[in-house]
Image (spheres, rainbow, N blue to C red):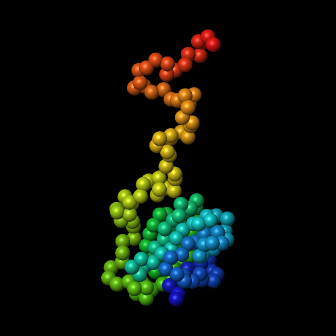
Amino acid sequence: MNYGELVPDGGGDPIPLLREKLTVGRRESCDIVLRFPNISSKHCELMIQSGYWFVRDLNSRNGVKVDGTRVQRKRLDPGCTLAIAKHAYSIDYSPIDLGASGTPPPDEETIGQVLGQSLLDRAGLEQRDIVNPYGRESNSENKRYDAQDDRAGQIEDPNRPV
């Protein structure tokens, strides 16, 4: 089944949208492969929700724009311009053919989706180990000074005779 197509703005063959969820990027394992140096290996994801196509940036270097505005996640209305890095496409599909009824779904993330992930996860970063945040060995040489510990001997005197 054909769920629509991406039509390159500068001309060229349209890219058929053959599944309800597609990964776009430079890597051969992506559903839509764009062989351009400014496209990330996994650049963005296209998915159908409630009969409408949505795009989600996968922490790409050069971003995703919808009608000229950089987005993280956005609904793609028929005929709008999707720019993947600097490569622009118009999306052509019929929401009714994809099962849409009533008003379109919200095009931004809901508050539940935003609060459901930590900021580090949303940014694609790793969280530090809370027990050993600096990755140091836990022997006495690397022990940090504890301001709440009033015991003597926490700091070695460099002038002390050996």
Residue 56 x, y percent position in the rendering: 49, 68
Could one spot residue 83 in this view of the protein? no
Residue extending furthest top?
161
Is the C terminus in the top left, top right, bottom left or bottom right quadrant? Answer: top right
Q: Which residue is at the front of the view, 30 or 43?
A: 30
- At 39% from the left and 67% from the top, the residue drawn is 108
- At 53% from the left and 64% from the top, the residue drawn is 58
Could one spot residue 36 in this view of the protein? yes
Residue 10 x, y percent position in the rendering: 62, 77
138 relative to 29 in the view: left or right: left
Q: Eyeballing the image, is 106 above or below 92?
A: above
* Number of marks in picture: 0
Q: Residue 96 is drawn in which quadrant? A: bottom left
99 relative to 155 in the view: left or right: left
Residue 89 x, y percent position in the rendering: 56, 76
- At 50% from the left and 76% from the top, the residue drawn is 21
Q: Eyeballing the image, is 156 above or below 50?
A: above
Q: Which residue is at the front of the view, 81 or 74?
A: 74
- At 55% from the left and 80% from the top, the residue drawn is 6
